[in-house]
Amino acid sequence: MEVRATTKYARMSPYKVGEVTRLIQGLSASNALEVLRAIPRKSARMIEKTLKSAIANATNNASLAADALTVKEAVANEGPRLKRWQPKARGSAGPIIKRTTHIQIVLTDGQ
């Protein structure tokens, strides 16, 4: 059975989050938590929070054992961009694009 959790509109670039999500795909849920705790990045904290939510969804909603779960899929999709402007030289303006990310984690019990 598959259980999923999603964090939407996380204020970080999808590229930065995607580097960390690729590390935990295919691992057991407990091993993935240990790997995320060892990574000193802000994106690892956001992914860890989403993974804990997916584990809680599996245990409470689907009555699955937490030690039997594996990370089937961990994806960082691009969300909407915030477009801002910064003053530049000689009266011009330069664009600033603030990216957001949708983090999705899918857990399975192997059946």
Image (cartoon, rainbow, N blue to C red):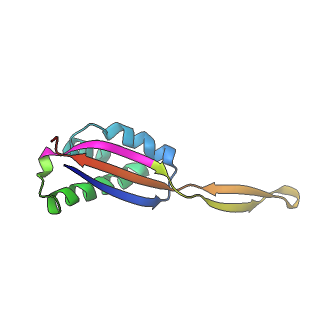
- The magenta region covers 68-76
Front residue of this view, candidates 11 and 107: 107
Q: Is residue 89 left or right of residue 54?
A: right
Q: Is residue 62 left or right of residue 25?
A: left
Residue pictured at 46% horizontal, 59% vertical? 10
- Above or below, comparing residue 89 to residue 28 in the picture: below
Q: Quadrant of residue 30?
A: top left
Q: Predominant secondary structure in magenta?
A: strand
Q: In the figure, is residue 71 to the left or right of 17?
A: left
**Residue at (37, 49) in percent of width and height:** 44
| Residue 41 visible, this orientation | no
Instruction: Tell me if residue 10 comes above or below residue 28 in the rendering.
Output: below
Q: Quadrant of the C terminus?
A: top left
* Quarter of the rendering containing residue 4: bottom left
- Asked whether residue 74 is drawn in magenta, I would say yes
Q: Residue furthest right?
A: 90
Q: Position of residue 96 (x, y in %)?
A: 67, 56
At x 21%, y 41%, the residue is 28
> In the image, residue 47 lies at what x, y percent?
35, 51
Residue 22 in the image, given as x and y percentages of width and height: 38, 38
Front residue of this view, candidates 34 and 30: 30
Where residue 5 sits in the image (x, y, percent)?
31, 56
Classify residue 68 as left or right of residue 36. Answer: left
**Residue at the image point whose x is 27% and y is 36% from the top:** 26
- Residue 89 at least partly seen: yes
Question: Is 54 included in the stretch rendered in magenta?
Answer: no
